[in-house]
């Protein structure tokens, strides 16, 4: 019985992810981001089988760590904001180093909180949460790609070519 409920819940979450409405297009970027975040929380909480208490404690800490990581990443210009065609070698070198430093700091922050995360939900559920977050991101990106391709086909452009991984 429990498996049937999970299947229905997952199907419902998938439909929510796929479905878009005209009102969603008018929402601000922050509102859409908040909605996506709440869907991620629901999806991951369900996939990992968290209790309400575990979920509340875990996501409070996760949000705190994510805010700190965002602050780290916002400290310097993003690599993509610098045009390699027009920037000097010195500017590019500094931007690349700063980007790597930021990613190291963010990874260190995550590492520093690992024990706290696992104390809240246990190592097994934490691993399941990590897996669920990856699945969720993959699903969101796939849905985004599908919507873009459908929109392009409606406009007579055909599907987009895969991006160059460089």
Image (cartoon, helix red, strand yellow):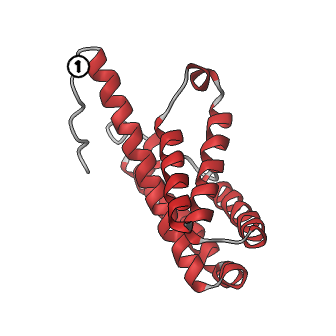
Residue name at image x 66 percent, y 49 percent: 38
Residue 56 in percent (x, y) is at 77, 65
- The answer to whether 68 appears left or right of 48 in the picture is right
**Which residue is outermost to the front?**
1
Residue name at image x 57 percent, y 57 percent: 43
Decide which of 125, 25 is in the foreground and name it: 125
Residue 142 in percent (x, y) is at 37, 45
Decide which of 150, 91 is in the foreground and name it: 150
Decide which of 37, 39 is in the foreground and name it: 39
Q: Which residue is labeled 1 in the image?
A: 157
Residue 6 in percent (x, y) is at 54, 61
Tell me if I can see residue 131 in this picture: yes
Residue 45 in percent (x, y) is at 62, 64
Decide which of 72, 132 is in the foreground and name it: 132
Residue 162, placed above or below residue 151: below
Which picture quadrant has residue 62? bottom right
Residue name at image x 76 percent, y 64 percent: 60
């Amino acid at each position: 019985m429990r498996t049937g409920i999970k299947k229905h819940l997952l199907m419902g979450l998938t439909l929510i992810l796929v479905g878009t409405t005209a009102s969603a297009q008018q929402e601000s970027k922050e509102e859409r981001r908040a909605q996506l975040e709440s869907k991620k929380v629901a999806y991951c909480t369900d996939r990992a089988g968290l209790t309400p208490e575990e979920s509340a404690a875990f996501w409070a800490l996760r949000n705190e760590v994510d805010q700190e990581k965002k602050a780290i990443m916002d400290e310097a210009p993003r690599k993509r904001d610098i045009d390699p065609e027009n920037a000097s070698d010195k500017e590019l070198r500094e931007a690349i180093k700063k980007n790597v430093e930021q990613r190291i700091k963010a990874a260190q922050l995550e590492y520093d909180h690992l024990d706290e995360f696992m104390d809240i939900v246990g190592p097994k559920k934490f691993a399941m949460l990590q897996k669920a977050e990856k699945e969720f991101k993959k699903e969101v990106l796939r849905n985004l790609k599908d919507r873009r391709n459908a929109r392009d086909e409606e406009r007579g452009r055909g599907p987009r070519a895969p991006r160059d991984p460089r």
